Image (spheres, rainbow, N blue to C red):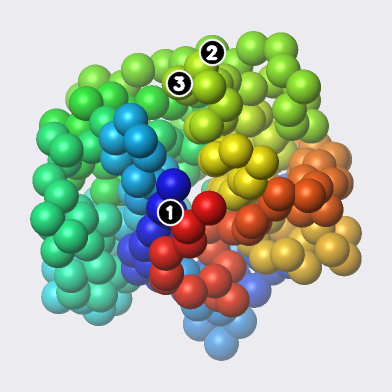
Amino acid sequence: MKLHILRCGTMRVSETIPFGDAVSLANTRRQLLTPDSKRVTLPNFCYLLEHPQGLYLIDTGWCREISPKGSYDARAVRSVLPAPLAALYHPQVEECMTAREQLAAMGICPEDLAGVLITHLDADNTAGLRSLRGAKRIILPEDEYFWACRTVYKARQPWSLWEDLPIERIYYRGSPLGPNRWAFDLLGDESITMVNVPGHTDGMAAVILRHGSSFVLLCSDAAFSPRNWREGIAPGFGFDRKKMMVGLEWIAQMEREPGCAAVLCSHDPAVTAKMIEF
Ligand SMILES: [Zn+2]
């Protein structure tokens, strides 16, 4: 299988987001108000998988509307995101770099996608989804959907980005995989498995892509960098720090397993946009 790592823009966020303060509403408020001098630029990755049964996109990155000229445009961001999220993310996406635009450059239109997997409903994962309307399936864990309409997620995960799309909700089941032993095998052959890793959100999925004895782990936002699991530092943005720490231990175990070809975080500045064959 071939995995294309697509860099779909950046976000300029508080330096406490990747290596954090405790997760609390007060700290989140501070992250929204962080001056630019205390922000870091993080990439926003999504992934295109060439699988024998078709093309799968995992997450969608930012959309063109957020950054019409390819640079940071506060007014355009506000036309897509509610004010608190616009303040949190400061997103931009350079010309030709949205998922839709990069797929088009590869000769792929949304209708060619066998599926788009959404790991969780934060705006940086879903903003590009509407531009991919036409994909054969849009797949989201039910646990993520369930919580997105409740508690603090309502403010964090704007429904306007996806509520009119035909999203298919899948159910995690008991599994030997994951910190929660809760996963969904998409094609029934263990080649694409969405594994519940709670902490960043309750329902978030990491994705294990397996071919023979070799696998790639896409850990979504369970970690922002290998430093999180190698040094035991939780990210400073999420929902439940204790669960995040359990998730980081699981990622560390997975990285040590024979056959691990790569562990990728969706906002790791050390990752480069390239193709991995495994
Ligand atoms: Zn997230």
* Above or below, 265 relative to 34: above
Q: Is residue 174 left or right of residue 204?
A: right
Give the spatial CA distance, label 1 vs label 2. Answer: 25 Å
Question: Looking at the picture, how far across and down is residue 227, in whole percent?
Answer: 77, 68
Q: Amino acid at mark 2?
A: Tyr
Question: Looking at the picture, how far across and down is residue 255, in whole percent?
Answer: 77, 53
Please name the residue shown 42% across and 70% down the image.
Answer: 273
Could you say which is closer to the camera, residue 188 or residue 225? 188
Question: Is the residue indicated by label 3 positioned so its CB lies within 8 Å of ligand 1?
Answer: no
Give the spatial CA distance, label 2 vs label 3. Answer: 13 Å
* The quarter of the displayed image where residue 31 is located: bottom right
Of labels 1 and 2, earlier in sequence is 1
Question: Is the residue indicated by label 2 positioned so its CB lies within 8 Å of ligand 1?
Answer: no
Please name the residue shown 49% across and 37% down the image.
Answer: 119
* Above or below, 108 relative to 183: below
Q: Which residue was labeled with disc 1?
A: 3
Q: Is residue 166 left or right of residue 205?
A: left
**Could you tell me how many numbered marks the image carries?**
3
Q: Which residue was labeled with disc 2?
A: 171
Task: Tell me the SS state at disc 2.
Answer: loop
Could you say which is closer to the camera, residue 91 or residue 181? 181
Q: Amino acid at mark 1?
A: Leu
Of labels 3 and 1, earlier in sequence is 1
Q: Is residue 119 left or right of residue 182?
A: left
Q: Which residue was labeled with disc 3?
A: 187
Q: Residue furthest front?
A: 212
Please name the residue shown 20% across and 32% down the image.
Answer: 135
Task: Tell me the SS state at disc 3.
Answer: loop
Task: Tell me the SS state at disc 1.
Answer: strand
